[in-house]
Amino acid sequence: MYNLPGVHSFSEVSLLITHCNRSRSLERLLQAFKNLQCSFGEIVVSDDGSKPEHLAYIQQLQHTYVFTLVTTPVNKGLGNNINKGQDAVSLPYTLYVQEDFEPSEQFAQAFGDALYIMQQRNDIDIVRLYAYFSYPYKKPFGNGFSKMKFHAAPWYTNHLKFYVYSDHPHLRRSDFLEKFGRYAEGVKGDITEYRMAVSFIKHKGKGLFYDDFTKVFYQRNSAAEPSTMNRSNWRESQKPVLLMIRAIYLKFKLLKCTFDLALSK
């Protein structure tokens, strides 16, 4: 697979970073790639209507880290941010990362292997490199990767099966939007992700999942620039009543996702 040199030049890959009001986090991400001696054919930063002070800082960063900045005058949401960023990409492969992540020492080897696989296998649309939870239904592929297997049958009861696609850091082909459609705009970020996940399945997308999925990237949320995504407390509580409610909710979600997929155009 990937022969690990001292300097890692991924010349066929565009690094696409989505950003909003977290310019120091963006700087940390770019510096982390530099520290690992990882370079890309191009870097695109797609900004979602950040405040003037953050935009000014990003423009300063362009003197240190060469990248294309794509902006919008007002916040238009995750879907628009990814769409306009992907539109600016010009190379065959895209590494998509949100600004609050940081690559680990394991990144170069894992990413090099993922890129090699995509170069050799035209049927692979996406390689996922980070997740909160493992994809539930997989088949070993080799070199630390597994192939995600979506099963529509209702006895495959884990609702996470619908997330063959995820917005977490991943490598994909740059014609992704042509095959699976553009991201939904004007809705919340989790709905944007879910609709793309449904489209990915509907259009018979195929993807790999890195088995050591918490070791390639780390999600960093500082006190100065905290995460803008918060989970409801009832979804994380271990109280018996709330656990029962959560179990019922997940069964409902499984049915809803099944119907959404069946009714999708």
Image (tube, helix red, strand yellow):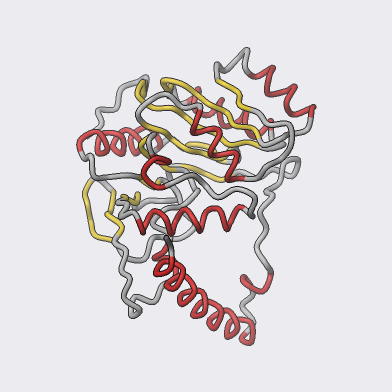
Q: Residue at x 41, y 64 (%)?
A: 162
Q: Residue furthest front?
A: 265
Q: Which percent across, then down, holds residue 95?
A: 43, 35
In terms of image quadrants, where is residue 72? top right
Q: Residue at x 60, y 45 (%)?
A: 78
143 in relation to 187, above or below: above
75 in relation to 237, above or below: above
Question: Left of 222 or right of it: where is 180?
Answer: left
Q: Which percent across, then down, holds residue 174?
A: 39, 34
On the rendered image, what quadrant is the C terminus found in? bottom left
On the rendered image, what quadrant is the N terminus found in? top left
Q: Which percent across, then down, holds residue 122?
A: 23, 39
Q: Residue furthest top?
A: 63
Q: Which percent across, then down, holds residue 102?
A: 53, 37
Question: Left of 197 or right of it: where is 118?
Answer: left
Say which of 232 and 187 sits in front: 187
Q: Residue at x 47, y 43 (%)?
A: 169
How many numbered markers are drawn?
Answer: 0
Say which of 249 and 219 sits in front: 249
252 in relation to 76, above or below: below
Say which of 262 and 231 sits in front: 262
Say which of 138 and 37 sits in front: 138
Q: Residue at x 23, y 56 (%)?
A: 140
